[in-house]
Image (cartoon, helix red, strand yellow):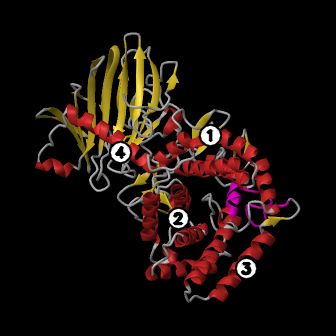
Amino acid sequence: MHKNLPMTASTRPPSQGTPYPPTSKYALIGDCHTAALVSEDGSVDWCCLPRFDSGSCCGRLLDWREGGYIAITPTTPDYTVERCYLDETLVLVTTFRDAGGEVRLYDLFSMHEGGRENPHRQLIRIVEGVRGTMELAVHVEPRFDMGEIKPWIRRHSNPPGPLFTAVGGDTGLVIAGDPELAIREDYRLDCTVQVSEGERSRLYVQYIHPEELDDGVPSVSDAAALDRRLDETIAWWRRWASKVHAPDALREAVLRSAIVLKALDYAPTGAVIAAPTTSLPADLHAARNWDYRYAWIRDATFTIDSLVALGCRAEAQGLRRFMERSAAGSARQLQVLYGVDGRRRHNEFELPHLEGYRGVGPVRVGNQAAEQLQLDIFGEVMELAWRWHVHGQSPEPDYWAFLVDIVEEAARRWEDPDQGLWEMRGEPRHFVHSKVMCWTALDRGIRIAEDSDLRVPLQRWRETRQAIRDTVESRGYDPERGTFVQAFGSREVDAALLLLPNVGFVDYDDPRMVGTVAAVREDLHHHGLLRRYRASDDLEGRDNPFLACSFWLAECLARQQRAEDAREVFEAACRTASPLGLLAEQYDPQAGEMRGNYPQGLTHLSHVSAALALVQAEQAD
């Protein structure tokens, strides 16, 4: 028996086809190339193949009727569900029970050594009988290119058994296993299976490019091969998890966040995506729907910090190299975000044929934020370079020339308004966090140059650095209240101000920062969590608490040696996690539901950072 984490139980029958369960009911599986979300009742409702940013082949999450899905569900309505991840893995186990029997459903993407270059691209689903006999319905209804293509499904007789192919556009799937599937007229496969104690029934769905079928239909993976791949995948994840250095006090939760971050790592390039989903609404009453299947420069600095702190240096190095490759060239061409392969164009467009999660559209592909001016990215690039310089990996001459260009661009543009950390879609403003990150760009450039005795216009850089500080301290600080403010000319605060100590602009225990933390906590507090800001963002609807901000607050409090307060804030944010330990972008306390794309990398890495700071503060006490 594989050791597993404590199960999460549902004492009532699951949705039984009710559209759009809460996102907390979904589990994540993946192979560091792509990912899928599996519902509590055994349905794969979101999956993009062959990689994170491909069109979906299972998209019921965004359109219940037309999106497509792959389900294995008990036929009786009276069953209960328990779910867990096998300990230190991303292998999901769903236990179904009814009056007649009990089965376990293992869900995974096959992993193996060498998978970075040669992934199996294989979703495996194995039903194992535990007690008695249970009947399950198997439904395979693929829909390609974000639900627009109903694929051509064919049956092939290949030893050791039949298989099916589904082809449409540039996507192909091979579908095979023990269930005796039958093709239906509405472009789907289905059947029922009975599984008794000690038996297994296996199904796999494997991506294949349609052109590969010109050379013949691949042979079926037999039962023994699929069982071996289950064991190989468990072993792969446990080998990886054994390298993670997490504090004993919070190891289980921190390791789960680390595994999520690893799952969001696109292995071929080292890119780490923000989330595996698009268009999950931040507000059910407005169009706050965005595509997060890309890698943000800003997130890279946070991610590398968390990965290094956990001992995951290979992943941190891979992400650093990806960002260097994607960003290098001209500072004026630096982008906020990149595709997982480093591509730059991400034209944002809507898909009106999809109704959206719970009918809340639009469904968007691409992200217009790639075209925004967000001045903080100059500081993020330089902070990244500085941290690797400190670790003995100073920039080579060609890359240093690019970094000098970054510093010069920050010096040239720091007085410009921008869209800021929160990617505001209204008129640009003079955000304090953006100014501070321009200061960071100058400061890190100066430090690297001084440490390495490199020839740069140090005097001019120092003068510009001081000018930014003077401006922020005069125009970005409210002396009456004793707090930094969101933007010049405003008395509002925002949660981005919690990040100012991270780059050394101000100490955590500086009275101005203590005042800022108090103001942020007072003004942005919402049912025990923290909103990003209170001022208008020129979008319809409301901004629910943004979970990373609560973890930022917890870290600030911990760094101020206020361990008890930090623990209170930290635990409030942790309580929003799904029963399986997954965290979303936002949370609606009044509805008691997650909002936004899920699971969210920034939330998980902020959770890691806050946990490490909290443990350190509590040990100091």
Mark closer to the chain start, 2 or 4: 4
Q: Residue furthest front?
A: 620
Q: Nearer the viewer, residue 290 or 614?
A: 614
Residue topped by disc 1: 574
Left or right of residue 56: residue 308: right
Determine the CA span between mark 2 and mark 4.
Answer: 33 Å
CA gap between label 3 and label 1 equals: 39 Å
Q: Which residue is mark 3?
A: 466
Lower sequence index among marks 3 and 2: 2
Q: Are marks 3 and 2 in contact (CB under 8 Å)?
A: no
Residue in the foreground of this view, choosing between 222 and 408: 222
Indicate whether 205 appears above or below 346: above
Percent across and percent down for residue 201 are 27, 25
Numbered circle sitting on residue 236: 4
What whole-number distance in Å separates the C-alpha atoms at marks 3 and 2? Answer: 26 Å
Which of pointers 4 and 1 indicates the residue nearer the eye?
4
Give the extent of the magenta segment.
Answer: 482-501
- Residue at image coords 50%, 68%: 335
Numbered disc in front, either 2 or 4: 4
Give the amino acid type for the residue marked by disc 4 in the picture.
Trp
In this rendering, would 361 be left or right of 58?
Answer: right
Residue 496 on the magenta segment:
yes
